[in-house]
């Protein structure tokens, strides 16, 4: 398709969906989803097509940045190549500075900006500086990334609650404020963000708090990108298996019986590698027959 046709198609979508104008002097705080550009929202695509400047962080996939309007300034705000990461305050100040110059500023973050994304802090800095802004939620990796691994975050036969927890504090340690016992007792499925480095501590906390050593665990790395990898293991083995395999960050750690559903729901491997799917991964039929 030639470019004019693409522009025509996009303009049709834009007007049919009544997408808002990206006004000069505004900041849009936008979630880019876990990686696959197909998981962007229409608001995110609209922002990419109209922004004067795109300030992105490490988790935003290159294939998404390619969708920025030709001529937009695309600026990285994160850690790379061993350089220290810019302070959160510096990033916020930069957004404010561009907005005050009358630019359309797109702050693009991985997943959802308000889930372990520091989007709230940046938005509050904009409020303090009286810069108008819009927040565009994104598909969070702990839901969308799991779906690409064939793991539903909830399933009626397994869990009526799911907890998203961070394995990493600002200082780099596992947060002290996590009540592992409450989590172990109250949340059948636990999705840990930023937990790969602290896997030994996290798994041992959960086992000490009563979770079974045999409980299934999945480590979902680079979910929804072409580099996606999934390691299935157990609570007792997870830390060793992760270290031996060298599975890279960013990764989610999923603890709970929901991981067993992968045998039936790993649609991506079924499509790409011809993996055979099991129609009864929880063995509910066998349980029903013997009951
Ligand atoms: N706001 C983001 C989370 C940022 S915290 C969101 O909503 O998804 C960073 C952590 O997110 C990573 O350490 C990892 O645990 C997780 N993460 C983000 N993108 C991921 C991806 N594509 N695959 C696996 N984990 C991902």
Image (spheres, rainbow, N blue to C red):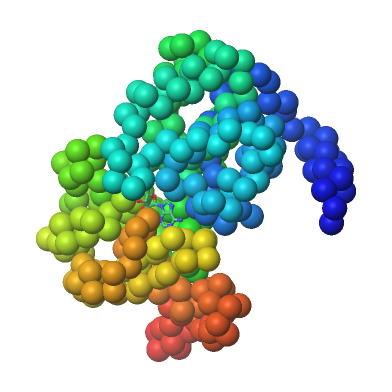
Q: Is residue 143 above or below residue 156?
A: above
Q: Is residue 1 above or below residue 49?
A: below
Q: Does 2 sit left or right of 155 as displayed?
A: right
Nearer to us in this view, 22 or 142: 22
Would residue 178 be seen by someone viewing this image from the given angle? Answer: no
Q: Does 78 sit left or right of 264 as displayed?
A: left
Q: Does 206 sit left or right of 133 as displayed?
A: left
Would residue 260 be seen by someone viewing this image from the given angle? Answer: yes
Residue at 32% x, 37% y is 85
Residue at 15% x, 57% y is 201
Residue at 17% x, 61% y is 200
Q: Does 54 sit left or right of 146 as displayed?
A: right
Nearer to us in this view, 128 or 98: 98
Total numbered circles: 0
- Quadrant of the rendering where the C terminus is positioned: bottom left
Q: Position of residue 149 (x, y in %)?
A: 47, 67
Q: Is residue 288 above or below residue 56?
A: below
Q: Position of residue 228 (x, y in %)?
A: 46, 66
Residue at 35% x, 74% y is 232
Nearer to us in this view, 282 or 127: 127
Q: Is residue 142 above or below residue 156?
A: above
Question: Where on the picture, by quarter, is residue 210?
Answer: bottom left
- Quadrant of the rendering where the N terminus is positioned: bottom right
Q: Position of residue 59 (x, y in %)?
A: 44, 48
Question: Where on the picture, by quarter, is residue 87?
Answer: top left
Q: Position of residue 266 (x, y in %)?
A: 51, 74
């Amino acid at each position: 398709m030639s470019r004019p046709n693409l522009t025509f198609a996009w303009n049709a979508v834009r007007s049919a969906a009544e997408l808002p104008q990206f006004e000069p002097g505004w900041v849009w705080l936008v979630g880019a989803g876990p990686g696959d550009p197909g998981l962007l929202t229409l608001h995110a695509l609209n922002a990419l097509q109209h922004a004067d400047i795109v300030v992105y962080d490490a988790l935003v996939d290159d294939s998404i940045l390619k969708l920025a309007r030709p001529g937009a300034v695309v600026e990285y705000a994160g850690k790379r190549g061993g350089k220290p990461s810019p302070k959160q305050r510096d990033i916020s100040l930069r957004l404010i500075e561009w907005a005050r110059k009358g630019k359309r500023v797109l702050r693009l973050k991985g997943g959802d900006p308000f889930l372990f994304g520091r989007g709230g802090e940046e938005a509050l800095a904009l409020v303090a500086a009286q810069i108008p802004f819009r927040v565009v939620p994104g598909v969070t990796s702990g839901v969308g990334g799991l779906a690409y691994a064939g793991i539903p975050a909830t399933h009626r036969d397994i869990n009526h609650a799911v907890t998203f927890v961070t394995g990493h504090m600002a200082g780099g340690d596992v947060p002290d404020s996590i009540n592992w016992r409450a989590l172990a007792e109250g949340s059948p499925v636990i999705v840990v963000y930023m937990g790969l480095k602290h896997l030994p501590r996290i798994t041992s906390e959960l086992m000490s708090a009563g979770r079974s050593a045999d409980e299934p665990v999945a480590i979902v790395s680079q979910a929804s990108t072409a580099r996606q990898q999934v390691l299935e293991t157990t609570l007792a083995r997870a830390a060793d298996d992760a270290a031996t395999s060298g599975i890279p960050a960013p990764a989610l750690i999923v603890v709970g019986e929901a991981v067993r559903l992968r045998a039936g729901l790993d649609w991506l491997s079924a499509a790409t590698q011809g993996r055979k799917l099991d129609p009864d991964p929880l063995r509910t039929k066998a349980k029903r027959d013997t009951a």
